[in-house]
Image (tube, rainbow, N blue to C red):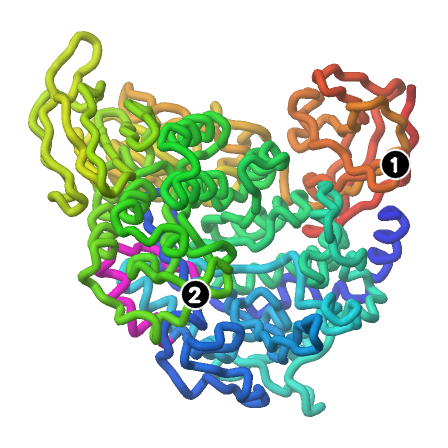
Amino acid sequence: MFNRYLKKAISAVLALTILLTPALFAFPVRADESLELGPVTSKDVVYQIITDRFYDGDPTNNVPAGFDPTLFDGTGDDLKLYQGGDWAGIIDKIPYLKGMGVTAVWISAPYENRDTEILDYKADGSYDRWTSFHGYHVRNYFATNKHFGTLNEFEELRDALHDNGIKLIIDFVTNHTSREMNPTAGNIPEDGKLYEPDRKEDGSFAFDENGEPYDYNGDGLVENLIADPQNDTLGWFHGLGDRGSDSSRFGYRYKDLGSLADFSQENGMVAQYLEEATLFWANMGVNGIRHDATLHLNPAFVKGLKDAVDSSNTVTHFGEFFIGRPDPKYDEYVYFPKQTGVNNLDFEFFRAASTTFGDFSTTMADFGDMLMYTQDDYEYENQTVTFLDNHDVSRFGYLQRNEKPYNAALATLLTSRGIPNIYYGTEQYVVPADGSDVSGRIFMETDSEFNTQTTAYQLIGDLSELRQSNDAIAYGTTVIRYSDDNVLVYERQFYDDVVLVAVNRQPDQSYTIGPVETNLPAGNYNDYLGGLLYGFNTVVTAGEGINHTSSFTLPGGAVCVWQYKGPASSTPQIGDVMSTMGRVGNQVYIYGDGLNGDVSVKFGDVEAVVESNSANQIVTKVPAGAVPGDNNITVTKGSSVSNAFVYSVLSGDQNQIIFHVQANTAMGENIYIVGNIPELGSWDPNNCTEAMLNPNYPEWFLPVSVPAGTQIEFKFIKKDANGTVTWESGENRVITSSSSSAGSIDTEVYTWRS
């Protein structure tokens, strides 16, 4: 099915090639400050803002020209409608954010969304009226959401944040447009259309002095329809209908999410357009991109998209791979960052925190177990983005109304591995009307007084400072020192830096613990929080092999944080690397300690050029000659060599081959692809592709990210549930990938050779 479909779609690419040539796009120039601040790292504390729901700094954009004024509320009463938050409002509240210790802000998608009412009909004939205030219904990637501001005002927001040392993350959707059919009205056609601005003769977009599209060709329109799921002659969309209850990988990746028109990212034309749209905004000087609905995306496309962005400007990438706990997709979730270079929003952490600190249905020991098995399972555990709640789940304040366990959860989030994300209003103990995600999307201007004296506000600031000053929090490993149903004591350590955290989730019950083993040096330790969460000082005594705290009693809701900051290291120590995957010439940030002075950097055995360095950061690039595949990055200073950090060097500019094969399998067997390039495992079955998809068994297919313009040798293999490998017979198969940067090749349907 997909073989025939894609060939039809790809045949239309040549007609639009001139319009999609990258050199013809008028990209904004990124601000120098973004390079100085660099990507978002585990040193940062992220604050997530639904732009429309934060603060109204410019009432003049509440009802843009042509917008139905009845779809604007502004009171915070009808959360299905626009409320008025904008980029000017975020600028107004920068002192509030900075005082809380926020070092990165994640905002809603900045581009134009569908701006007409969305009707959801009920069984009694009545209906709800919705808007796309959230930013997940793209209409035009190359125009701003006028409810938020102009392109110039976006740049003002970027500059104001950067001037205050705050990084900028944008939400971005490449999975879908808007709802193509209405499931509440018999699936009648609805929208899903995609537009773009007028183009000049050279193919570049027409923008005025404010960076806004205008009617360049004089036809009375400022934008042009380029894709319509109701008339999809060029194969922009998969067009397979809503996923419904289909829980297969094929269902998640190729069917509509909530009836939203699902892009066909296997179509080279579509992949190139989405890459250019993402680059348009990445090159505006942002520091990170949060990719929506990564569970539903083709991983080969995601890998190529990330490669395209970072080959222009290295930023932090993380995505929404939505899972439960437990979840049969857990292994796929764990593999996704290694597969694509895009890390995850840590839903495993979120689920455990919700049941441990929210409804108390699981124990603190279970939470500790989660910290340990994810440390083992995750490829880059300190880069996953952790959270207690966000815009797609219940507010934590709805689950937990008592401030003591609420604060304990927040302290645990801020001292655990990963990049902590604070959902706007968490610091104000927001309690929504119900547990729905929509009720949690409060209008903070009317729901809060932006109180800077709450315990949560102060707690976030204090632990943000600790995260930046003590490398154990940002880069350290985790060891559970004690756990039971209600108490957890865990230790973070990076070389000589150590932080010991003791947490009691019960608000009104004390527990006596100890002595507790620790790598804190012998001595007296003050509670870093100064008793903010009922903590106290402790004494550590030397022991044989390991030290111990004295016994201690944790009052109800107590959190103690004891820390030791070792002296500045004279030897190089790598704590983290951004990003973790790229090709020759890509910029790479190395973080840690002892990185100053006369240092050299190697990728494997190949030395890289050090562009700049300080005690805590090196900026370099993937060197020419670096061997494709996993490379150990090391830093050498004098006779001292750092620990190694694994970086995946790509074979080249990534595009896609969609492989097809006809093969019969026994129960429990799947088909995989292995070949002569790292992207196909370099002939190692243990490093081959993921299992192929088989919606039309016995035909199997799989899009795979490969280097452009490359002759590739490959074979199909079978693996059973025990990992037993069966190779197909015959000579190696040979195919050459597309020479286009985002191109795709759709193979013939091969026949398995017994």
Is the C terminus in the top left, top right, bottom left or bottom right quadrant? Answer: top right
Name the residue carrying label 1.
697
Residue 185, horizontal then vertical, whole percent: 76, 71
Q: Is residue 248 magenta-colored?
A: no
Mark 2 Cα-neighbour bin, 10 Å: few <14, some 14–19, many ≥20: few
Residue, disc 2: 433
Query: Residue 727's spot in the image, x, y percent?
Result: 81, 18
Question: Does 556 sit left or right of 7 as displayed?
Answer: left
| Disc 2 element | loop
| Residue shown at 82% from the left, 37% from the top | 694
Look at the picture and state if 474 lies above or below 53: above
Q: Amino acid at mark 1?
A: Tyr
Q: Residue most toward the left?
A: 524
Q: Residue at x 61, y 44 (%)?
A: 303
Location of residue 544 with respect to 561 vertically, above or below: above
For the residue labelled by badge 1, is the local secondary structure a helix, a strand or a loop? Answer: loop
Q: Which residues are magenta?
A: 88-106
Residue 46 at x, y = what percent? 36, 53
Residue 48 versus residue 610 in the image, above or below: below
Residue drawn at the location 73% of the way across and 38% of the way down: 710
- Going by the numbered disc 2, the residue's amino acid type is Ala
